[in-house]
Amino acid sequence: MTDPLLCVRGLTHSFGAVRASDDVDLDVHEGSLHAVIGPNGAGKSTLIGQLAGEIRPDAGSIHFAGRDITRMPVHRRARNGLARSFQITSIFPGFSVRENVALAVQAHAGHSFRFWRRADAEVSLNDTAEATLDEIGLGARADTLAGELAHGERRQLELAMALAPSPRMLLLDEPMAGMSSDEAARLSDLLAGLKGRVTILLVEHDMDVVFALSDLITVLIFGRRVITGEPAEIRASDDVRAAYLGEAG
Amino acid sequence: MDTERRRWLPLAGLALLAMIPVIAGLADDPYLVTIFTRVVILALAAVGLDFIIGYGAMVSFGHAAFIGAGAYTVGILAHHATNGTPLIPGVSWLSGTTAGLVAWPMAVLMAALLALFIGALSLRTRALYFIMITLAFAQMFYYLFVSLEGYGGSDGLILWDRNTLPLIDTGSAIQFYYLCLTCLAGTVFALRRVVGARFGRVLRGAAENERRMQALGFPVYRYRLAAFTIAGGTGGLAGALLANLQTFVSPGLLHWEQSGELMIMVILGGIGTLYGPVLGATALIMLEETLAAWTDHWMIVLGPILIFVVLFARRGLFGWLTGGRR
Amino acid sequence: MLLFLEQLLNGLQLGVMLFLLAAGLTLIFGIMGLINLAHGSLYMVGAFSCASVLASTGSFLLAVAAGVAAAGLAGLVIESAIMRPLYARGHLDQVLATFGLILFFNELVRIVWGPRPLFIDVPDWLAASVEIFPGAGYPLYRLVIIGIGLAIALGMWWLVQRTRLGMLLRAGAADREMVAALGVDTRLLYAGVFMLGAMLAGLAGALAGPLFAVEVGMGEHILIQTFVVIVIGGIGSIRGALLGALLVGMVDTLGRAYLPTVLRLIAEPATADGVGSALASMLIYLLMVVVLVWRPRGLLPAHGH
């Protein structure tokens, strides 16, 4: 068994008196889809925040591809292949859809201290962008201004931007949020297709998707990792059921 | 159609500016050339400011410091050349110069270095602080130059002559005007290329959504610092030209009111267009010249005009002239 | 030694004046996210109003009250007419619009009061010298300013820490949208905060009259110093404003008093004095640089900032 691609040990972070992450351990193996679930306030966003580098853990460590990234700044993690999508859509409304994705590709295509050639004429950037958009299903909207997209399309763009530079690992923060069932189904198929190519850490509330796609599921409650296991195990667990009592399944 | 207007309007404007000496000759008003030389030089500085404000969302209220740095570089070099004293006492080979080919690049360099210093400190922190910090730094350097008694202190420094250049007679008002106009046109052209290139895209992306840019993998700070330095350099060039136009430099060049004037030019003309500031500079200086002839208190309208533009006419003159969306 | 004490008190006095301005400004920044360059203009309005009323009534107390009222009124007008549309806009728009206000007020004052500075004297009943130490007299007026400033600092502490309004202020400084979402009438809150800041600025202006020249442009001079205070202290916190103000007041005063002297130890008098006074005027900015390198958010920023 090879080392996990993402290895989290003892991750702890408090906001004042609230322990948002309480000694969390997590292993995500290359090529797998690992879901993190838990009731509201369980600390899922804080976890993603620390993995992405926006929140500095009070204690614990994060290793990615063998490197200690616990203190690494956000942009360097992305450069190292750890991409992330946002729960609340975070795109560039003033740019075209294509340009949004091309930008994502540009970040990994050498440096951007280039002052003369038109960026929107760079064929390699545009080709990769369009390929990703086609895969996601937004190909027809490539020239549209991102600010004019419908909500579901924005979520698709959100994912496209994370996916375009072919990252080693994706941190997906509730990608289905606000999607219609059609859109969610399409996204679910897309994620299924990505398995094996890209390692995925998925934070989601949509339990159907979680149980259908995940190789492993970690349950967080009040910041603590309560259990990690395969979907069937999680489904059968009484602790998990108790924690979710009253929550839509 | 508005995109076509956006294309030929700047060219028309350039042509008009190029005609100024002709118009001045026909109207027998040589002063017109002087006014418009000033317009063109300040427009150059304002264009550099628009680059960082309009495209980079870096609201700098200390841009005058770079003009001052450029102007004083020219002034100090000329001062030492005229006096025959070395720049640093004891180091005899470090003499001053009145050669434009040396002084002007030096002016750009010094201003760029100043921008690098100020930017390195100011860009690490929040946008709200940035405005205050750039204002404070500009004031600090204002006080620095006031205190330099050796270079005129608050009275300023007189240049005996304009810098010399090969092929061009800088003493000729018309030739100097065309030289400044070339610098302006060149800068606008160059910055437009930068804005459309990878660098510009990163800058614009960071202005719209810095958080996402970081998440994509861009070290935003580095790009912003580079942009700020470039803007500083253009301010330095403007300063060198201004020093030559006036054959006089004084700390007043760095005063926050000058920074404010530049910002007015940018917003009046149209932010984030690079052409707008040229319109804004023209409009503001024409306003100053015409209104000042009527009353001493013409400034009282400037404030409300500015507020009006900010609240209701934000796209500025360029936006109004080209119609449609940006 | 006595001279040092005197300078120390001078620094304290400058500090509390800066605090009066910084407290209002930092609240406005922190709670409304608004940059207000015209804060200095309110200070100026307070000073000029005070000078006018003093000249016509002879009563200093009335004059100060007039200064506060005038600034408060100006603040109210500005807030409702110009600031309201600006809350939603970005910093650039706020900077430009409030800069427009500066231009307007400066010219207005010039038209109404003329271009020359006004000089007002410390009123007789405050002109005495107090013996703080045997043989050492210190102007009563300056002591009164220090007293007022510290009283207001205490009052603000009480307001922010011990009242419901203060709770709203602290919450608003940390999370503006949340406060609005909780159903608080933000329009009233913002107007109130702005007026409070304006009145404090007016008070500072009125009190400053006898000490500095009352002239056009006095607002901007102290505004920039106030910005330095806020950058050093941290946005949104009154404590930060107080700490920053006292630091800046002390550093500036003691620097101007002693830097040339200190430099004389290592250089000849002419150079020492020249460099000394140059450095002294830049000292607070250098302090700002040091703080920025060490603590980019200021020394005591409010939570959430």
Image (spheres, coloured by chain):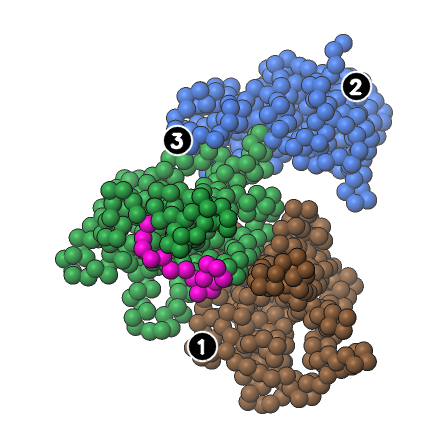
Chain colours: A blue, B green, C brown
> Left or right: where does residue A244 sit relative to residue C245?
right
Dot label at residue A229 = 2
Judged from the image, the secondary structure of the residue bearing numbered disc 1 is loop
Residue designated by label 1: C115
Does the magenta run of residues contain B155? yes
- Residue at 46% of width from left, 23% of height from top? A125
Crowding at dot 1, Cα within 10 Å, few <14 / some 14-19 / many 20+, comes out as: few
Name the residue nearer the viewer: A52 or B85. B85
Crowding at dot 2, Cα within 10 Å, few <14 / some 14-19 / many 20+, comes out as: some
Eye-nearest disc, 3 or 2: 3
Dot label at residue C8 = none
Q: Amino acid at mark 2?
A: Gly
Q: Amino acid at mark 1?
A: Pro
Figure quadrant of residue A86: top right
Residue designated by label 3: A116
Q: Amino acid at mark 3?
A: Trp
Q: Which of the marked residues, 3 or 2, is nearer the chain's N terminus?
A: 3
Where does the magenta region start and end? Answer: B149-163
> Left or right: where does residue C265 sit relative to residue B154?
right
The answer to whether A165 is drawn above or below residue C125 in the figure is above
Please, which chain is the residue tagged with disc 1 on? C
- Residue at 40% of width from left, 70% of height from top? B300
